[in-house]
Amino acid sequence: QVQLVESGGGVVQAGGSPRLSCVASGSIATILSMGWYRQVPGKQRESVAVITSSGRTNYADSVKGRFTISRDNGKNTLYLQMNSLKPEDTAVYYCRLEHFDTWSRYFEVWGQGTLVTVSS
């Protein structure tokens, strides 16, 4: 069973530049995409940044130019470099993985989330 473990959250001052990490473990044959999503209480979870197997990236308009998603394939680790943080970036950030296992079955996996609180 594949698991995702996020880290790097916490309380950060506005303008700060933390980096989130997400480590994937388990039986992964082919990664289709990995991404970061966020959610605040009372609102729907939204996509922040996604990177496909080919390396193509997609960002939410609200974070373009401030956040950078990257992947270390050898370590099965996903990163989100967050720069110029704003109070409205406060949320629980979740890592998501889409993959095929060794039997070509499709799976979607979510991490447990890491809270990022931006203080003004």
Image: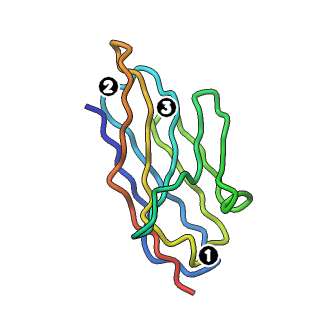
Q: Position of residue 38 (x, y in %)?
A: 48, 59
**Which color scheme does this rendered protein use?**
rainbow
Q: Is residue 3 left or right of residue 86?
A: left
Q: Is residue 20 left or right of residue 29?
A: right
Q: Is residue 79 above or below residue 104?
A: below
Q: Is residue 8 left or right of residue 55?
A: left
Question: In the image, what residue occupies the spot 62% across and 72% down?
Answer: 85
Q: Residues within 10 Å of mark 1 (few under 14, many from 20)?
A: some
Report the quarter where the C terminus lies: bottom right
Looking at marks 2 and 1 on the same chain, the residue that comes earlier in the sequence is marked by: 2
Give the residue at mark 3.
74
Q: Position of residue 27 (x, y in %)?
A: 32, 25
Looking at marks 3 and 2 on the same chain, the residue that comes earlier in the sequence is marked by: 2
Looking at marks 3 and 1 on the same chain, the residue that comes earlier in the sequence is marked by: 3
Describe the element under mark 3 as helix, strand or loop. Answer: helix
For badge 2, the amino acid type reads Ser
Q: Is residue 80 left or right of residue 108?
A: right
Nearer the observer: mark 3 or 1; the answer is 1
Q: Residues within 10 Å of mark 3 (few under 14, many from 20)?
A: few
Give the residue at mark 1.
86
Describe the element under mark 2 as helix, strand or loop. Answer: loop
Q: Position of residue 2 (x, y in %)?
A: 30, 34
The CA span between labels 3 and 2 is 14 Å
For badge 1, the amino acid type reads Lys
Q: Position of residue 83 (x, y in %)?
A: 65, 66
For badge 3, the amino acid type reads Gly
Question: In the image, what residue occupies the spot 56% across and 81% down?
Answer: 13
Tell me the quarter of the picture where residue 81 sits. Answer: bottom right
Residue 27: image tag: 2
